[in-house]
């Protein structure tokens, strides 16, 4: 092929490329593909939103039926179902978008299946996390809203998934734990809690009189504070300190309300003891002067 023919052939290819790029066929194809992708995404969002509302309505209707589940378990299952629905819809949308690019989805899935089988042998931790997550949900070990302690983390459960769970500490940090690491859990939200308060009274005071004042106060508290489920108990003298007599009070309260009730008990007991004139001991300092002692001896 001579140089002139080569240049002519290159010019022909360039002209065809420019004609294809500037022609309506390419842009119509791109426009239809973009429109199809936007439509797929729009339908996916509608399905997720409608499905989330349907799941929420389903759980709301269950409250009126004969079969009831706890609010903790309901929040966990509702969030898990909504997340699973989102994952499934997103996966299907991704496959449909690939088809718009005329890719062989069947071949890709077959290759992904073989690759996934090979990766699965090395992803034992992932499989362990999923299995552990299933049993956490199935056995209702803890649910969304519970206050738990596990793997050195303590706080409220924000989310329970098949692979991870999120625990938010009271200072605001969110800890994401693989379910496989949740080997031992302390759940503080299942049963009622116990508030423990120690009250100090001065040695100079009448202990029996102090006990009568505290017992009279404890009978009034369940009517004033809904967190207190039963009348608190005064166990008696707990300790004889260096400058005080320590009496212990315990109170059964609603789950996770023991800190609040403990503060309430200290305040109420302090006010009642002040009303009846019983002194709570406080640090005292005695000053001793050798100069004053010498002057007294001379006198």
Image: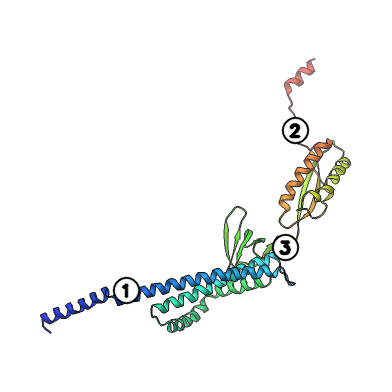
> Circle 2 sits on which residue?
284
Taking depth in this image into account, of 240 and 230 the one nearest to the observer is 230
For residue 74, what is the image quadrant? bottom right
Where is residue 145 drawn, in percent x and y? 65, 61
Local secondary structure at mark 2: loop
> Looking at the image, is 16 positioned above or below residue 195?
below
How crowded pointer 2 is (Cα within 10 Å; few <14, some 14-19, many 20+) is rated as few
- Residue 179 visible in the current orientation: no
**Where does the N terminus fall, quadrant-wise?**
bottom left
Where is residue 190 drawn, in percent x and y? 72, 63
> Looking at the image, is 203 positioned above or below residue 256?
above
> Circle 3 sits on which residue?
190
Identify the mark nearer the N-term, 1 or 2.
1
Residue in view at x 71 percent, y 50 percent: 260
Where is residue 161 drawn, in percent x and y? 59, 69
Local secondary structure at mark 3: loop
Taking depth in this image into account, of 238 and 276 the one nearest to the observer is 276
Q: Which mark is residue 27?
A: 1
């Amino acid at each position: 092929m001579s140089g002139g023919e080569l240049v002519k052939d290159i010019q022909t290819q360039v002209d065809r490329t420019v004609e294809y790029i500037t022609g309506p066929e390419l842009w119509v194809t791109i426009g239809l593909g973009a429109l199809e992708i936007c439509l797929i995404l729009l339908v996916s969002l509608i399905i997720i939103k409608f499905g989330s509302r349907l799941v929420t309505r389903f759980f709301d209707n269950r409250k009126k039926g004969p079969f009831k589940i706890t609010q903790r378990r309901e929040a966990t299952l509702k969030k898990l179902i909504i997340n699973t629905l989102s994952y499934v819809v997103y996966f299907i949308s991704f496959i449909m978008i690939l088809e718009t690019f005329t890719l062989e989805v069947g071949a890709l899935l077959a290759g992904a299946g073989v690759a996934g089988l090979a990766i699965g042998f090395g992803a034992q931790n992932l499989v362990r996390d999923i299995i552990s997550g299933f049993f956490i949900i199935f056995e209702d070990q803890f649910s969304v809203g519970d206050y738990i302690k596990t793997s050195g983390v303590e706080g409220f459960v924000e989310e329970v998934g098949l692979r991870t769970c999120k625990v938010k500490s009271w200072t605001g940090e969110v800890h994401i734990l693989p379910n496989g690491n949740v080997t031992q859990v302390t759940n503080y939200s299942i049963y009622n809690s116990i508030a423990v308060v120690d009250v100090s009274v001065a040695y100079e005071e009448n202990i029996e009189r102090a006990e009568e004042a505290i017992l009279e106060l404890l009978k009034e508290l369940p009517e004033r504070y809904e967190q207190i489920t039963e009348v608190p108990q005064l166990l008696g003298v707990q300790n004889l300190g260096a400058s005080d007599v320590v009496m212990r009070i315990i109170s059964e309260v609603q789950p996770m309300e023991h800190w609040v009730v403990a503060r309430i008990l200290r305040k109420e007991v302090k006010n009642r003891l002040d009303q009846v004139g019983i002194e709570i001991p406080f640090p005292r300092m005695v000053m001793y002067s050798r100069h004053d002692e010498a002057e007294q001896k001379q006198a």
